[in-house]
Image: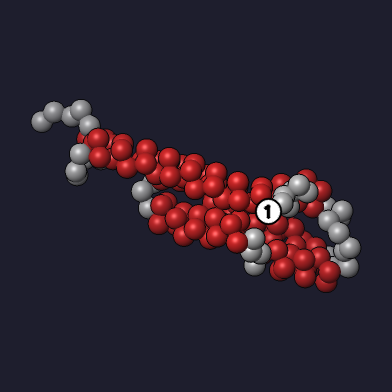
């Protein structure tokens, strides 16, 4: 029982990481420091996609499922609904390259937008200081 719960938690963590890799640049629109966490995660996610690597969370989850006595993912809500998002059936080499390129283009666009917004404000101005007169 505990192994099945742990495996489900690993899947949730895996999905959260995938969402952060894909959409984490948007956090930098609000918090500058988010880029320091997101850029390494993005590099890892793109590298995994382009090299067809295996995220370390995948074998951990699989070992936990085997330890729980599961043959597959048909034991829980998380297994039934979230796993197809993380491990889609039609994911081939070409799709992985496409996903990696989409990740790069999307995140470059968001970070370019962030940099343009910050440079338009000028040095030393924060969001709250725009338009204020002394």
Place of residue 99 in the rendered image (x, y in percent of width and height, measured from the top left): 60, 47
Judging depth in this view, the residue of 10 and 43 nearest the camera is 43
Q: In screen coordinates, is 19 left or right of 34?
A: right
Residue at screen point 89% across, 63% down:
71
Furthest-left residue in this view: 134
Asked where in the image residue 121 lies, by quadrant, the reply is top left
Q: In screen coordinates, is 110 left or right of 69?
A: left
Place of residue 33 in the rendered image (x, y in percent of width and height, measured from the top left): 38, 53
Residue ID for mark 1: 93
What colour-coding does the image apply?
Answer: secondary structure
Is 131 drawn above or below residue 80 in the view shown?
above
Place of residue 15 in the rendered image (x, y in percent of width and height, measured from the top left): 65, 52
Judging depth in this view, the residue of 48 and 5 nearest the camera is 48
Count of labels shown?
1
Residue at screen point 22% across, 32% down:
130
Is 101 drawn above or below residue 55 in the view shown?
above
């Amino acid at each position: 029982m505990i192994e099945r719960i742990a495996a489900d938690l690993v899947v949730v963590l895996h999905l959260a990481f995938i969402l952060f890799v894909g959409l984490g640049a948007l956090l930098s629109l609000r918090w500058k420091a988010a880029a320091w966490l997101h850029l390494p995660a993005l590099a890892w996610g793109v590298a995994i996609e382009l090299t067809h690597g295996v995220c370390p969370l995948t074998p951990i989850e699989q070992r936990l499922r085997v330890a729980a006595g599961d043959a597959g993912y048909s034991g829980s809500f998380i297994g039934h609904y979230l796993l197809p998002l993380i491990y889609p059936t039609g994911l081939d080499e070409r799709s992985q390259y496409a996903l990696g390129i989409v990740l790069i283009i999307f995140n470059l666009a968001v970070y370019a937008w962030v940099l343009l917004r910050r440079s338009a404000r000028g040095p030393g101005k924060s969001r709250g200081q725009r338009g204020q007169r002394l």
